[in-house]
Image (cartoon, grey):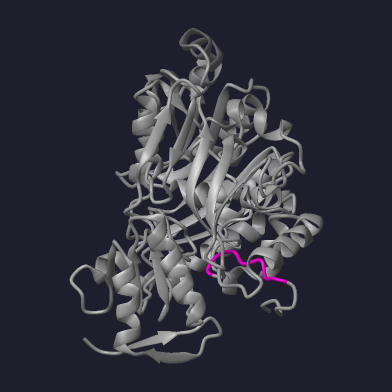
Amino acid sequence: MTDVRVGTKTGASGVLEEPVVETLKKKLRGKLLRPGDDAYDKARRVWNGMIDRRPALIARCVSVGDVTACVDFARDHDLLLAVRGGGHSVAGNAVCDGGLVVDLSPMRSVQVDPKTRTARAEPGATWGDFDRESQAFGLATTGGFVSSTGIAGLTLGGGLGWLMGKFGLSCDNLLSVDVVTADGRVVTASDTENADLFWAVRGGGGNFGIVSAFEYRLHPVGQLFGGLLIHPFERAKEALRFFRDFAMSAPDELSSAAGLLTSPEGTRAVAIVLVHSGSLEAGERLLQPIREFGPPMEDHVGAMAYREVQTMLDATVPAGLRYYWKSSFLSGLSDDGINVLVERFGDVPSPQSQALIERLGGAVSRVGRDETVFDHRDAPFNLLVMSAWSDAAGDRVNLAWARETWEAMQLLSSGGVYVNYLGQEADEGIERIKAAYGPEKYERLVTIKSKYDPRNLFRMNQNIKPAGEAPSA
């Protein structure tokens, strides 16, 4: 056993003597890992293979008591603190160099009450975990586009997903949270208790504390009608125009997205994803025109269990690839914009990269703008340019393609961005974080941050700095 070299919040380095580290270890029910331990390298890895950070300590928390002990320890020793839920963030903020990682991934319990149609979930759960438990009772809530995403990060940033047209975002279905604050207290936040904090966590990310429990509203969700349509790349412009018009006129029950991608055989193609959450008969009737258009090369649309819907795209975003994203909400999807996107994808350097258009609207747009932090509810579409590749030697060309494609599409941008799709602050800049919320909401968030975390202990996120702390350049 040896002393541990650590990094502080301000970037300085220091040393924690072995007896000090032992005090934290003795307070934990879970394991405390450090470099050299057998499980350390696996625990420091996250979904984005570009992230290669070496924390001084990783606390594998199994209880709220473990979380509070870590918060107190990091605060008292001025440590850089990162919080890991699902570890699926493209920015990689779940891990840090030299600091303490509060690893919540062992805390994955999901408890469903079918009578009240609610679920209480721990922060390490993925949507796969959540869906398994809720679907046992024929219930669900909006939960992302792939099952490996963590419930915590997705919900705290807003929460786009396949059920959002009918039921709203993940954060719109949040009833309460338990939060470990920077001073080590555990508080409950809801519409009636600590309402300012509850408002802030519905879109403001992990800036205000560590959420140790989420309570969700659930909805009856049985078999859905949907799946994938694949069109040849040569007809990409026509397919995307048809998708746009069809999606804009569709009812709330239909959630949809379209993407440019490369097939496993190496052929570029257009994929249209359709998920209808009404009756199977109504879904089949509604989707008939878009299934007949073209016609598509492949039609994988039919009756599907919700858990099938949630996993159908998992293989397109495997853990360990090098990922870089650029994103913007769109004010519309013009023919000119479609042409630009298709032409840019014609030069995509990696077969793993994608360009996605996600349809919003429906219930998302009918929640009051000021009810949650999540902004830009009137945007009809979201653009996600997702560059993915396997070899570090390809960094320069793949980063450039994503940035240049995103820049070329700014002719359609609403000026806003989905905070969960932002990359590292050093690359994005503070103005992009502000763009996720708009100036008025951002200032309100600064006030709440100053109340609950005045020393910015929780800074490994899309950081909202408290009053008095200078913003990054």
Asked whether residue 99 appears in the rendered view, the answer is yes
Task: Specify whether 173 is left or right of 230.
Answer: right
Residue placed at 40% from the left, 20% from the top?
Answer: 138
Residue placed at 71% from the left, 80% from the top?
Answer: 470
Q: Quadrant of residue 442?
A: bottom right
Farthest left residue?
38
- Count the numbered circles shown: 0
Is most of the magenta stretch helix, strand or loop?
loop
Residue placed at 50% from the left, 11% from the top?
Answer: 279
In this view, 141 is above or below 444: above
* Residue 3 place in picture, x, y as percent: 30, 90
Q: For the N terminus, which image quadrant?
A: bottom left
Q: Decide which of 278, 230 is in the foreground and name it.
A: 278
Q: Decide which of 13, 303 is in the foreground and name it.
A: 13
Instruction: Provide the residue span drawn in magenta.
Output: 460-466
Task: Specify whether 256 is left or right of 446.
Answer: left
Q: For the C terminus, which image quadrant?
A: bottom right
Q: Decide which of 164, 271 is in the foreground and name it.
A: 164
Residue 324 sits inside the magenta stretch: no
* Residue 309 place in picture, x, y as percent: 40, 30
* Residue 57 place in picture, x, y as percent: 34, 75
In this view, 116 is above or below 369: above
* Residue 370 place in picture, x, y as percent: 77, 44
Task: Specify whether 42 is left or right of 339.
Answer: left
Farthest top residue?
281
In this view, 47 is above or below 316: below
Q: Quadrant of residue 66?
A: bottom left
Residue placed at 50% from the left, 52% from the top?
Answer: 153
Residue 463 sits inside the magenta stretch: yes
Asked whether residue 322 appears in the rendered view, the answer is no
Q: Decide which of 294, 178 is in the foreground and name it.
A: 178
